[in-house]
Amino acid sequence: MSAVLTPPLTKVTPTLQAAQPVPQLPPQPFRWTLKDYRALARTGFLDDKRTMLLDGVICLMPNPNPPHDTAVGLTEAWLRGVFVTGYWVRNQMSFDIGEDTDPGPDVAVVPGTIRDYAQAAPRVALLIVEVAGSSLFGDTTTKAEKYATAKVPDYWVIDLENRQLIVFRDPSPLPAALGANAYRQRTTYGPDAIVSPLAAPDASVKVADLLP
């Protein structure tokens, strides 16, 4: 009988490798949700500040001045006479867009009554109006995009410096990768022009009557 040869056993010593360092991420901005933003407000920290939440960033707003307040008041008073029943005209109150944006519009016409929003801010509006002084660029770009994304059909910007009204209408989707909307129509009206809300075409106002 022939012998079966087996290879000699060798001792294998494991090779220890140095642990690779975990790459450190650069500091990341903290993005506020609407829920966190409201919780912060309940602490009283924002009581003496005018703020809005845009894409998770808390932005300080300039304090209103008499021309701004006058235009807001004139606009609110006129709209309350137009939208008498079935709607509520809100003055500088919350309007939620998505989960991280509340631009706090100057005037908003929303469906329902004041009690319908006792527990949550509206997310739907028939008409939103911003009164713009130094905020004109942001109101006609960033806020216009936000309101279009919220599908607000009628968005007005009262331009105090140039004494005109800019009206945005027909919110439509941008390319899918952008995940947002934009208004197809932008029309500028001088102080002598007559305008009507889309939701109340039989009511009209002279632009000058909304200006201080």
Image (cartoon, rainbow, N blue to C red):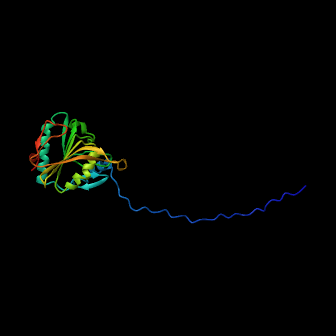
Quarter of the image holding residue 193?
Answer: top left
Q: Nearer the viewer, residue 179 or 21?
A: 179
Q: Position of residue 156 (x, y in %)?
A: 19, 46
In the image: residue 17, left or right of residue 141: right
Quarter of the image holding residue 111?
Answer: top left
Q: Which quadrant holds the N terminus?
A: bottom right
Q: Nearer the viewer, residue 193 or 49?
A: 193
- From this view, report whether residue 209 is shown above or below residue 4: above
Residue found at x 29% / y 44%? 172
Quarter of the image holding residue 16?
Answer: bottom right
- From this view, report whether residue 20 is shown above or below residue 185: below
Residue found at x 15% / y 54%? 64
Q: Position of residue 188 (x, y in %)?
A: 16, 49
Q: Nearer the viewer, residue 150 or 116?
A: 150
Q: Position of residue 198 (x, y in %)?
A: 19, 39
In the image: residue 201, left or right of residue 96: left
Residue found at x 13% / y 54%? 162
Q: Position of residue 4 (x, y in %)?
A: 84, 57
> Looking at this rendering, what residue extends furthest in the right direction?
1
Number of marks in the image? 0
